[in-house]
Image (tube, helix red, strand yellow):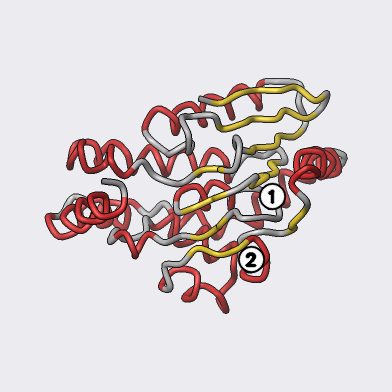
């Protein structure tokens, strides 16, 4: 599900879970395991990228529909764990969007300390409301952290996906590069961040992101959104979207 490549002091992780690296319980668990291995290794920084023309197309919606409320109850905490594991790592993490980074895939990309995108046809955004599901609290705070207050409502409520250039303007992406340069540029960026004394980097990163911990991981808000996802209204909208778009 995740391929690993050593580049000296940088570990490259490549999402390789089916055609679209859709987020399911197994991939979320593997992301957490990969981060554990990274932090136990000698690597000073990590690059997370995808396969082919897709970084990640987001949550596996068919699994959500087929699994029902029981699967949802397991999936949402797993999503929070994986995002938290990426977002709050002390070590530098660079995300390199080789193509589409949509919905949950966009959230994973936003976890990077630097977020690169490949110029081309790839689309980036969080169209959850077009599917009919509410944003988990940590997802809202992560988008707010990434795009800033000015672009928050556009990013969330428009429920759109954007070109790499528009994603750069919105704040989902920090830099757009040519596709053939993406991995080398991501590794170079990771090495630059790794050159900072680790304790200084970790302290500053954690202070910058501490605003995400409270509202993003509030137990009452998490329970509320899980109840909404499992409601007949939201599950019906999700099933209708899957039938209409995925068959």
**Quarter location, residue 89:** top right
Camera-nearest residue between 227 and 49: 49
Q: Which residue is denoted by mark 1 in the rendering? A: 113
For image coordinates 46% across by 60% down, the residue present is 126
The answer to whether residue 197 is seen in the rendering is no
Mark 1, secondary structure of its residue: loop
Quick one: 24 or 18, which is closer to the camera? 18
Q: Position of residue 181 (x, y in %)?
A: 81, 44
In this view, the residue in front, 122 or 133, is: 122
Which residue appears farthest toward the bottom when viewing the image? 150
The x and y percentages for residue 100 are: 55, 50
Residue 11: % across, % down: 72, 28
- Mark 2 secondary-structure assignment: loop
Which label belongs to residue 164? none
> Which disc, if any, is residue 171?
2
* Label 2: few (<14), some (14–19) or many (≥20) C-alpha neighbours in 10 Å: many
């Amino acid at each position: 599900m995740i391929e690993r490549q050593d580049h000296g002091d940088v570990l490259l992780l490549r999402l390789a879970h089916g055609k679209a690296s859709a987020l399911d319980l197994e991939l979320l668990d593997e992301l957490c395991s990969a981060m554990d291995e990274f932090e136990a290794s000698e690597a000073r920084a990590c690059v997370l990228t995808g396969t082919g023309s897709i970084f990640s197309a987001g949550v596996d919606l068919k699994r959500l529909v087929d699994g029902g409320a029981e699967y949802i109850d397991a999936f949402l905490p797993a999503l929070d764990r994986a995002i938290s594991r990426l977002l709050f790592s002390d070590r530098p993490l660079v995300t390199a969007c080789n193509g589409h980074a949509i919905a949950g895939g966009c959230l994973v990309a936003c976890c990077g300390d630097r977020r690169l995108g490949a110029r081309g046809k790839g689309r980036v955004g969080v169209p959850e409301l077009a599917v009919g599901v509410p944003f988990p609290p940590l997802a809202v705070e992560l988008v707010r952290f990434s795009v800033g207050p000015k672009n928050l409502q556009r990013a969330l409520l428009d429920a759109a996906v954007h070109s790499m250039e528009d994603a750069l303007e919105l704040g989902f992406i920090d830099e757009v590069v040519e596709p053939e340069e993406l991995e080398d540029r991501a590794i170079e960026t990771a090495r630059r961040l790794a050159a900072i004394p680790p304790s200084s980097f970790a302290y500053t990163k954690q202070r910058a992101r501490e605003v995400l911990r409270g509202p993003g991981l509030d137990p009452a808000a998490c329970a509320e959104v899980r109840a909404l996802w499992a409601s007949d209204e939201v599950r019906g909208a999700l099933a209708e979207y899957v039938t209409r778009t995925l068959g």
